[in-house]
Image (cartoon, helix red, strand yellow):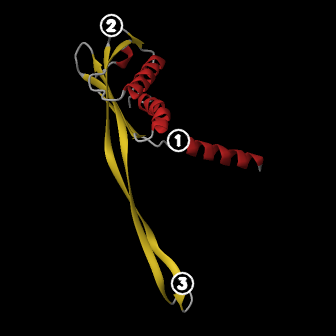
Amino acid sequence: MKKYIFILLAAATLGLTSCSPFQVRSDYAESANFTSYKTYKIRIDDLKLNDIDKDRVLNELSKQLQTKGLQSGENPDLIVNVKANHKKVTDINSSSPYGMYGWGGPFGWGVGMSRTWTSNYNEGAIIVDLVDAKSQKLVWQGIGSGISVDSPKAKQRQIPEIMAEIMKNYPPQRK
């Protein structure tokens, strides 16, 4: 019995930890030799964020790149372009028309109401492009979206999480 409870708890834990609030995807050039890349330099020309969020993104990106074995350098193998954007999202929710019982019990005449409501919020995305410095060609791209832009506390927590999710796909596992 203890064995079954342990398996159930392990499955529940795995299920909860594998659910990410972010949508992350990546793509890469099959001709790229990712083992040859040892150094990087971050370029932030298109990173239109406030200074606080910019620091969060750049610090976490540098940390993630270094855990992948890459070092910052002035004559890099990879140019890292970082971009961020956001969009306004409108969620429309409605409830089913369940209501009170009416005349004649549960199968008689009655009143039911449906309810529809909307919520508007801003959702952010981060795009990381890795460009081969010699050929100036894009060799890897990671995109993560789903950041709660309207909440400073959520951004503080979510930026490191989404950067880790994005960089989890680098270097790509060839099939």
Q: Amino acid at mark 2?
A: Glu
Q: Which residue is mark 3?
A: 101
For marks 1 and 2 on the same chain, the one whose residue lies earlier in the sequence: 1
Which x, y percent locates residue 62? Answer: 42, 19
Which x, y percent locates residue 137? Answer: 23, 21
Which x, y percent locates residue 48? Answer: 30, 29
The residue positioned 30% from the left and 21% from the top of the image is 44
Q: Which residue is mark 2?
A: 74
Please state which of the two labelled residues, at mark 1 or mark 2, is closer to the viewer: 2
Q: 152 above or below 95?
A: above
Q: Which residue is mark 1?
A: 18
Choose between 125 and 52: the one closer to the eye.
Answer: 52
Is label 1 in a helix, a strand or a loop?
helix
Q: 157 above or below 62?
A: below
**Image quadrant where one finds the C terminus:** top left
Q: Is residue 82 left or right of residue 96?
A: left
Q: Amino acid at mark 3?
A: Tyr
The residue positioned 49% from the left and 76% from the top of the image is 98
